[in-house]
Image (spheres, rainbow, N blue to C red):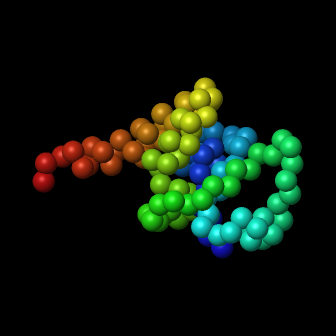
Amino acid sequence: MRCPLGGELAADRLTHYLKPEQFTIYTREPLAKLVAAARMKAGPHGNVEVLRQFWQLEAEPSRDVVPAILVYADLLATNEPRNLETAKLVYEQHIAPILRQTAQPS
């Protein structure tokens, strides 16, 4: 079962800067299948968010994380200062270089 990681966990894998407190998993699998496979249990203060994988792009190579632009968006959506700081790093390290490459004339 392939479930790319998003949010704080993905940001940690990309930057090695953030200690994740919340865990985001994207999947195309039925929720019940994921919960059973991972032996997850619901809790009132749980720190795992499972979201439907909505894109067709592959995960980042060899990291099993969602595309960097989605990691960036996940972090911005939290409005947490530590995540906003990490979002800046994700942008600078993984998004801006691609934008610069595509902006250069051929």
Vertical order, 80 against 66 (above or below): above
33 sits left or right of 60 in the view = right
Instruction: Name the foreground residue: 68 vs 29.
Output: 29
Q: Residue furthest top?
A: 81
4 sits left or right of 106 in the view = right
Vertical order, 90 against 102 (above or below): above
Instruction: Name the foreground residue: 76 vs 15.
Output: 76
64 sits left or right of 94 in the view = right
Please provide percent x and percent y for residue 31.
Answer: 71, 64
Instruction: Name the foreground residue: 46 vs 92.
Output: 46
Q: Residue at x 70, y 50 (%)?
A: 49
Q: Residue at x 59, y 51 (%)?
A: 6
Residue 54 at least partly seen: yes
Q: Residue at x 65, y 70 (%)?
A: 29
Vertical order, 4 against 37 (above or below): above
Location of residue 93 (image quadrant): top left
Please provide percent x and percent y for residue 41.
Answer: 86, 57
Location of residue 64 (image quadrant): bottom right
Query: Which quadrant is home to the N terminus?
Result: bottom right
3 sits left or right of 104 in the view = right
**Figure label count:** 0
Q: Residue at x 42, y 38 (%)?
A: 92
Residue 38 at least partly seen: no
Please provide percent x and percent y for residue 79.
Answer: 59, 29
Please provide percent x and percent y for residue 59.
Answer: 50, 62
